[in-house]
Image (cartoon, helix red, strand yellow):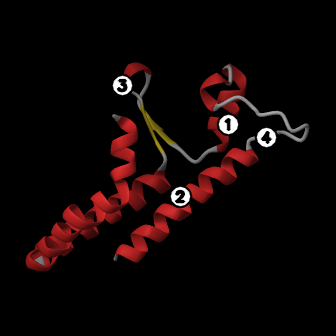
Amino acid sequence: LFRLARILIQASFSRASRLSRASRSCSGRHTPPMAAVEGEQMQEAFRRCRHFEVGKGWLSVSINPVVTVVSTLLIWIFVIICVVEPDYMLKAMNVAAFDWIPEVWTWFYIVSQ
């Protein structure tokens, strides 16, 4: 379990660095972040992404169905495992909370202070 978490964390950091390198144009200049992209370019980027929109005006909701389905499945799997094996999950969560999180994320707490 801890190895899987460590692998996922390392993969997310390496993916972020690849995305940072990919955001550079052919000339080597850094392209602006999505928040800095104006009107048409932002709409074009949003159009290319998978999304589902419901409603109009301030009541509209826009979701990415892939992210929504995967995250919902992961949450439900976690809940079902907790209901089926509460003692095992309690032990696993205690180990994660008192051993793994302080060991791996102490640097983040120190930097944030």
Choose top left, top right, bottom left or bottom right for residue 83.
Answer: bottom left
Rendered location of residue 79, percent (x, y)? 20, 66
Give the labeled residue for mark 2.
Answer: 12
Q: How many residues crowd around disc 2 within 10 Å: few (fewer than 14), some, or many (20 or more)?
A: few
* Sequence-first tag of 2 and 3: 2
Q: Which residue is mark 1?
A: 45
Q: Which residue is mark 3?
A: 59
| 103 left or right of 15 in image | left
Corner quadrant of residue 70: bottom left
Q: Is residue 43 left or right of residue 4?
A: right
Residue type, mark 2 in image: Ser
Q: Measure how far apart labels 4 and 2 are at the Cα level.
A: 19 Å
Quadrant assignment for the N terminus: bottom left
Residue 65: x and y, percent?
A: 47, 52
Q: Earlier in the sequence, mark 4 or mark 1?
A: 4
Q: Residue at x 77, y 34 (%)?
A: 30
- Rounded to the nearest whole Å, what is the CA distance between mark 4 and mark 1? 16 Å
Mark sitting earlier along the chain (4/2): 2
Q: Position of residue 59 (x, y in %)?
A: 36, 25
Q: Tell me, for residue 97, which label it has, or none.
A: none
Tag 1: amino acid: Ala
Identify the amino acid type marked 4: Arg
Residue assigned mark 4: 24
Near mark 3 (Cα within 10 A), the count class, few <14, some 14-19 or many ≥20, is few
Chain-order first, disc 3 or disc 4: 4
Q: Please tell me whether mark 1 sits on a helix, a strand or a loop.
A: helix
The structure residue drawn at horizontal position 79% and vertical position 40%, both measured from the top left corner, is 24
